[in-house]
Image (cartoon, helix red, strand yellow):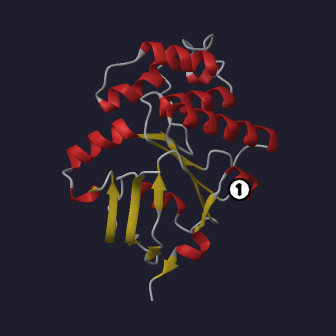
């Protein structure tokens, strides 16, 4: 498998918090990687570093064999928009937009033409085709989450990053969300990186990185 993303000697300084140092991480084409650790272990911090959203104090992030943070911010934003899909812990659906418009934001942010055929396919395959013109407030939590996943995969990203996608769900719904993420990642031929403290989903991953062991306070 081709290496898509890798880190070397990453450390992050957070105001008022200890320095976090992370072991090297490699993400390959189509691979599923779990960043597992308790609150405060640096899961979301590392996810932000991988996405090109948080420049580390030390170390290097390489995407497609390019030094991600050596690129101009505009170039990095362009690469992120076209190659990364995000499922946030807070879903960030805009209340004034309907579901269809919220999903299409992914194309707008990436500055690519909206693929209406793919959008319609996603709405149908996720059971949302009859909900497309509803505002988020008129959708159930599960429907909102499916909409957020549709937005993340609309542009067929190379990497899907998900932050705590199951932590607030019961066992049945947590399993359903993981099956959905796995299916959509497979369809888009994307790598899937999930950051969570939810040990229930470990069985979905062959590559598990335990951040409680990897994120360390600087000596």
Task: Indicate the position of residue 214 as horizontal and vertical percent values.
Answer: 54, 74
Judged left or right of residue 28, residue 137 is right
Nearest to the observer: residue 205 or residue 84? 205
Look at the image and tell me in which quarter the C terminus lies.
bottom left
From the top left corner, tell me how far across and down residue 201 is, in percent: 72, 51
Q: Secondary structure at mark 1?
A: helix
Going 59% across and 76% down the picture, which residue do you hit? 213
Residue at 57% x, 36% y: name it: 186
Q: Residue 166: percent from the left, percent from the top?
A: 68, 46
Q: Judge whether 15 appears above or below 91 on screen.
A: below
Residue 98 seen by the camera: no
Q: Residues within 10 Å of mark 1 (few under 14, many from 20)?
A: some
The outermost residue toward the left is: 72
Vertical arrangement, residue 11 with respect to residue 99, above or below: below
Image check: 143 left or right of 114? right
Task: Looking at this view, name the residue that lies furthest to the bottom.
Answer: 219
Residue 64 appears anywhere in the view: yes
Instruction: Name the residue beneath numbered marker 1.
Output: 202
| 58 relative position to 84: left or right | left
Give coordinates of residue 188: x percent, y percent. 50, 32
Q: Is residue 84 above or below residue 195?
A: above
Tell me which residue sits at (22%, 49%) in the image.
Answer: 73
In the displayed structure, does residue 76 sit left or right of residue 143?
left
Q: Nearer the viewer, residue 193 or 29?
A: 29
């Amino acid at each position: 498998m081709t290496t898509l993303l890798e880190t070397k000697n990453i450390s992050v300084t957070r105001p008022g918090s200890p320095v976090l140092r992370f072991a090297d991480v490699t993400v390959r084409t189509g691979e599923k990687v779990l960043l597992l650790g308790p609150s405060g272990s640096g899961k979301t911090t590392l996810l932000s570093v991988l996405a090109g959203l948080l420049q580390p104090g030390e170390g290097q992030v390489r995407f497609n064999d390019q030094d991600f943070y050596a690129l101009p911010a505009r170039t990095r934003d362009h690469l992120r928009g076209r190659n990364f899909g995000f499922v946030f812990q807070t879903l960030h659906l805009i209340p004034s937009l309907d579901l269809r418009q919220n999903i299409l934001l992914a194309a707008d942010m990436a500055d690519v033409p909206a693929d209406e055929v793919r959008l319609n396919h996603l709405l149908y395959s996720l059971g949302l085709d009859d909900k497309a013109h509803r505002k988020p407030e008129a959708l159930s939590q599960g429907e909102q989450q499916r909409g957020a996943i549709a937005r993340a995969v609309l542009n067929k990203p190379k990497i899907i990053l998900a932050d705590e996608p199951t932590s607030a769900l019961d066992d049945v719904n947590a399993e359903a969300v993981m099956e959905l993420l796995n299916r959509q990642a497979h369809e888009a031929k994307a790598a899937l990186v999930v950051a969570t403290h939810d040990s229930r989903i470990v069985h979905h991953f062959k590559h598990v990185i335990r951040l409680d062991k990897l994120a360390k306070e600087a000596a």
